[in-house]
Amino acid sequence: MAEEQKESMGFFKRLVSGLGKTRDNIVSGIDSIFSGFSHIDDDFYEELEEILIMGDLGVDTTMKIIEDLQEKVKEQKIKEPAECRQLLIEIIKEQMAVDETAYEYEHRTSVVLVIGVNGVGKTTTIGKLAAQLKAQNKKVIMAAADTFRAAAIEQLTEWSNRAGVDIIAHQEGSDPAAVIYDACQAAKSRKADVLLCDTAGRLHNKKNLMNELSKIRRVIEREFPEAYLETLIVLDGTTGQNALVQARQFKEATDISGIVLTKLDGTAKGGIAIAIQAEMGIPVKYIGIGETIDDLQKFDSDSFVHALFEKTEGDEE
């Protein structure tokens, strides 16, 4: 337990430093409003609105936050702008809270389908998840169903070696659904706890993508009906509002149960984590802030918002 606490503290420190640019982008502006206004009026809310929108929270999410804030200010009869800071933090935390059942797949025989465009860190995410699940004494199998890029198969094979887990792979150009079929048979016969599936991320041809993903899902549902199906979309935190566009397009193609937000270290667009959750109604379940296996962690809204609003000495630089 102490070891776990130490690890999560280490991650929190990295998260605080990783969110530095986002903090500069959003929080410094918010703080100047809270200290710059002597009373709460329409101008105060307008300025706040502008900063949140500029911080990649997007219009819809910002409006919702402002409405909640106005309501709470009225309810609690708050007069001082500075007192709104904590209220704002609480509202954002509430919006981002992850349900306790979010990681149900860890406790059941499950198939985790990992989707997303190329270059967002899909294969790396699968590798890190495999290593973490293996460390929990789970039997893990990987399926290399991104058959369009030889590099993806090689990369996943490398991760399987590193994590010490089995991989099911075919040649480049083979049918992804056939890979999934074989992987389901292997998972059943080897009594795997979790089957992690990599998929191709070609958004430019949406019809093909939809067909491919629905074919893969059909194979899983037919061949491995007893497995719990989790679908995680991996999004690149540095792309801001574009990540939201990608998530919407994939949501049209398949059901999504969770979001993995990668590359949050060093981006000024970390506010997208708040927007995506609010606008898609899909929880952020994991965040990535670096290259090592421990740099992918379960999302905790308290830690994230605390890290975002944390005042650190380095922020003045």
Image: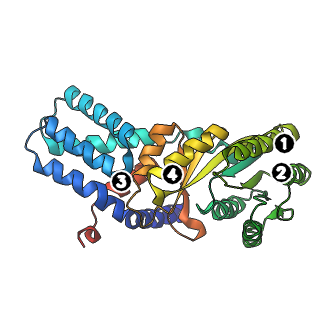
- SS at mark 1? helix
Q: Classify 10 Å Cα crowding around label 3: few (below 14), some (14-19), many (20 and above).
A: some
- SS at mark 3? helix
Give the spatial CA distance, label 4 vs label 3: 23 Å
Residue 310 seen from this side:
no
Q: Is residue 43 above or below residue 54?
A: above
Residue 207 seen from this side:
yes
Mark found first going from the N terminus, 1 or 2: 2
Determine whether label 1 and label 2 are within 8 Å by CB: yes
Give the spatial CA distance, label 3 vs label 2: 40 Å
Mark found first going from the N terminus, 1 or 4: 1
Q: Amino acid at mark 2?
A: Ile
Residue 306's mark?
Answer: 3
On the picture, is 90 further left or further right than 78? right
User: Which residue in the structure is indicated by mark 1?
Assistant: 219
Give the spatial CA distance, label 2 vs label 4: 27 Å
Q: Amino acid at mark 3?
A: His
Query: Could you say which quadrant of the image residue 165 lies in?
Result: bottom right
**In this view, the mark in front (4 or 3):** 4
